[in-house]
Amino acid sequence: MTTMMMRRLTTCSTTCFRKTLKQLNINNSRHKYLIRHYCDQQSSKRSDSGPLTTYKKLVLQGKLQHDPHQEDVASKLEDLLGRLEQYEKDMEEYHVSLASWEKNRENERRRILMGEAESRQQGDVWTATNKTRSTFVEKYILRKRDDTVEPGVGKWVSYLNREKKLNSAVGPRPVAPPAPKGLYLYGNVGSGKTMLMDMFYSATEGIVKHRRRFHFHEAMLEINEHMHKIWKDQVQEKCSESGIYSWIMSLPFDTKVKEWLVAEERYKKEVQMKNILPAVADKFLVDRQAGQRGASILCFDEIQTIDVFAIVALSGIVSRLLSTGTVLVATSNRAPEDLNQDGMQREIFLKLVAQMEEHCQNVLVGNEVDYRRLIAKRVVSQDHYFWPLDEHALNQYEKMWSEITNQTGGGITSNTISVMFGRVLEVPESCNGIARFSFEYLCGRPVGAADYIALARNYHTVFISDIPAMSMRIRDKARRFITLIDELYNHHCRLFCTAATSIDDLFQGTDEGTLFDLESFQFETETEGAKLRRDVLAEGNVSSVGGPSGIVSLLSGQEEMFAFRRAVSRLIEMQTPLYLDGVYSLHPCFQRKPLTVCCVYFKVEFDPF
C-alpha cells in the first residue's frame, strides 16, 4: 500500500465517510483527524446557513433592514439549531429502544392472551371456579351478573388487567430524551415572523430527517385527510376481520375460544381508536408505524384556534407531538393565551396552552413596522401587479405572459391537477409550471384552500386577471382571494395580475361595512350544503367556503383586519427581488428536481506499517 493516496468521497454523511475509511482498512487511531476535519466542514457549512448568519448576510446586502428584535429571534433560532444535531442522535437511540419495547410488549401480550385462551379451552372459567355450586344458584348468579354489569365493562376490566400484567412483565415505556425548547413567535403583520421561521427550517436540512413546514390551512386539510383515511381503514377492517385475525384461525383452539380471541382483539382496537387524534399525530410528521427513527421538527405558520374543530384537533395532535419529542417552531399574530378570545372549549384550549408553554419559549417579535412594505418602497417595480384595468395594464400583462411562456419553449395547454379525496381542479391555460386564470374562475366558484394548495404546489408562476376592488358585497370572493394569496405566498409562487385598484386600496369596506376573514372560517363548524363536518369527514369531501351566519359573531374586527393587512403585505412582498430570487430555490416544483451530488477530495496519509 502506498504512503499517499487520493480518494474521492461523497459528503453524504459521517457514517458513509466512516464506512469508506473502513473499506480502505485505515486504523481508527489514524483517521480520527480525518473524521473531525470532515465533521468540522459539515458544521461549518451548517453555521454558514444558520438563521443568524443568513439574517446578518441579508442585512449587509441591503435586502433587509436591521431590526434588534429580528436579530434576537434569529439568535435564539441559531441556538436551537445548534442543539438539534445531538438531539437527532439521541432520538435515533430512543426509537431503537422504543421499537424493541413495543415488540416485546406485543409478544408478551399475545403470550398472556394465549394463556387465557388455554384456560378457556380447558373449560369455562366461570364454571371451573364454581363446581360446587348448584345449577340453580349458578344460573341465578349469571343472570344477576348480566343484569348489573354494563355491556363492555367485562371486556374493559379484562383489557385493564392485561395492561397491568404487561406493565409488570415488560416494564414502562421508554422515556424520550428531553427535547430542546422550541419557539413560538408572535407579532404584527410584516414583523418578520414567517421569514425567520423559514430561515430556521431551511437550516435544519441535513440535520434532522423528519421535518415539516405547514401553514394553518394546509395542516388542517392534512389532519382531515388522515382522519378520513384512519376512519375508512377502521371500517374496512370491521368488514374483513377474518383476514385481519387470520393468525387466530390457525391456533389449536375450538371455535368458541377463537371467537373470544377475535372479540378481545377487536376490543383492543376499538379502545385504541376511540381517540383518533394520537393516531393522526403519529402520521402527521413521521409514520412511526413504518419504523422510521430520529427527531422531528414542526414549523407551523399562522397557528390559530378559531373554532371548536381547530381547538380540539390541534390540542390533541400538537400535545401528542410535543409529548413524544417533536420540536415546535410556530408563528402567530397572538400570544398563545390570547388565541381563543371567544372561550370555545376552554378546558381543552388551556391544556394546549400549558403544553406549548412547557415545550416552547414565547417570543414577541416586537416592532410595529411592516418591513415588507418598507423594503418594497425602495426596490419594488410594477412588473407584476398591473392596475387599473385599462388597455395599458392589459397590454403589459399579456406581454409578460407571452415572454415568460415563450422562455419555457412549451406549448400552452389545458390541464387537470389532483386536489384531495379524489377531487380535481381544471387549469384552463398552463405551460411548464406556469398557469393562467381569471379572478372569477379562482374566487367566484365554490373552491377553497385545498384547491389553492394543489395549485400552488403544481405551478411556480401564476397569472390572475381582473381582480376587483373588494367589499362586503363580494365578501365570499374576498375570503377566497385572501386564502389564495396565503397559499401562493406560503409555497413561494411568482404572481402576475391585473387589478382594478392599487394594492393598498384592494380591500375596501368603508361604504358597505367591514369585511370578515375566510381564514377564520377555513375549518370551522361549517356546513357543506346540509352536511355537518362529521358527514363531510365520512365522505372524504372537504370544502372551504361558506359558513353558518351564527359563526360570524365570533370574529372580532381586529382579527378580520389582521387577515386583510397580511394579504396586502404579502402582495407587496411578492414583487420584491428578495422574494422573487427565492422562487427557483424554494418552490416545490424546483425542490422536486434531483440535486447535484456534492463531493470533496480528501488527502489520506498514513505509514506503510
Image (spheres, rainbow, N blue to C red):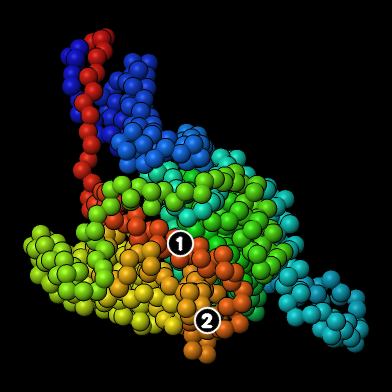
Name which of mark 2 and mark 1 comes first in the sequence: 2
Q: Position of residue 44 (x, y in %)?
A: 35, 28
Q: Position of residue 189 (x, y in %)?
A: 47, 55
In the displayed structure image, the side of residue 62 where residue 274 appears, left or right:
right
Q: Which mark is residue 213?
A: none
The quadrant the N terminus occupies is top left
Question: Tag 2: residue type?
Answer: Gly
Q: Which of the pair 502/81 is nearer the observer? A: 502
Residue pointed to by mark 2: 547
What residue is shown at x 90% (from left), y 76% (from top)?
Answer: 132
Label 1 sits on a secondary structure element that is: helix
> Taking 207 as reference, is 476 above or below it?
below
Residue pointed to by mark 1: 565
> Taking 261 as reference, is 48 above or below it?
above
What residue is shown at x 20% (from left), y 65% (from top)?
Answer: 434
> Marks 2 and 1: which is nearer the front?
1
Determine which quarter of the picture holds residue 609: top left
Question: Tag 1: residue type?
Answer: Arg
Kindly tell me whether residue 430 is visible in this rendering: no
> Taking 550 as reference, is 343 above or below it?
above
